Amino acid sequence: MIIKVKRIMTCKVSLIIGSKSDKEIGDKAYKILQDFEIETEYEIISAHRNPEKLSNYLKNCDADIFIAIAGLSAALPGYIASKTLKPVIGVPKEAKLGGLDSLLSIVQMPPGVPVACVGVDNSRNAALLAIRILALNDGDLQRKLEEYKESNKG
């Protein structure tokens, strides 16, 4: 079966959740990205249930950074990292075992398939890490981050 994916518009960050049950965590990252006016695509694509769709999406997506939120075996971030050379930030979601299963699945990637990982359910930090990466080449974004950091102390 051939799955056609339309050409995706230019975006800076692609935020991918594995299922609708991850949406609450994904929405928190999306809000931060929107607050910083970062062009973001927000998709629900499972690495297990629809690997062909995810593979096609990744081939056609021109995002600079991927954020992947996943629970249980948390294969989504690793799958994405295996298909791209761009930075991938994994967010383990608490589903069982206090999220430890997801956390270990993301941080224990094999050599050559790096995935950055933030704390369990901490998608806000994933968004902020993506913004920090983008800010390396964007002075305006650096200033916004400095203002954000100052206003969110304590």
Image (tube, helix red, strand yellow):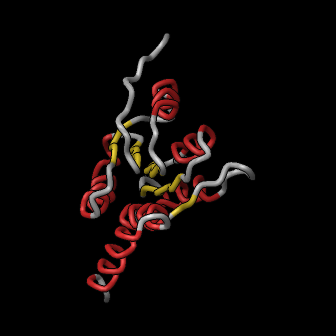
Classify 149 as above or below 51: below
Regarding residue 119, the answer to whether it shows in the image is: no
Residue 50: x and y, percent?
A: 46, 27
Classify 90 as above or below 54: below
Which of the 4 quarters of the picture holds residue 140? bottom left
Residue most extreme to the right:
111
Which of the 4 quarters of the picture holds residue 10? top left
Residue 8 vs residue 137, the one in the foreground: 137
Residue drawn at x 48%, y 64% as measured from the top left? 137
Regarding residue 136, the answer to whether it shows in the image is: yes
- How many numbered circles are shown? 0
Residue most extreme to the bottom:
154
Indicate left or right for 12 with 86 as reference: left
Residue 89: x and y, percent?
A: 51, 56
Residue 54: x and y, percent?
A: 48, 31
Residue drawn at x 65%, y 54% as measured from the top left? 114
Residue drawn at x 54%, y 59% as measured from the top left? 103
| Image quadrant where one finds the C terminus | bottom left
Residue 154 vs residue 12, the one in the foreground: 12
Classify 148 as above or below 48: below
Residue drawn at x 45%, y 31% as measured from the top left? 57
Residue most extreme to the top:
1
Residue 119: x and y, percent?
A: 47, 67
Indicate left or right for 56 with 42 as reference: right
Which of the 4 quarters of the picture holds residue 6? top left
Residue 72 vs residue 45, the one in the foreground: 45
Indicate left or right for 137 with 152 as reference: right
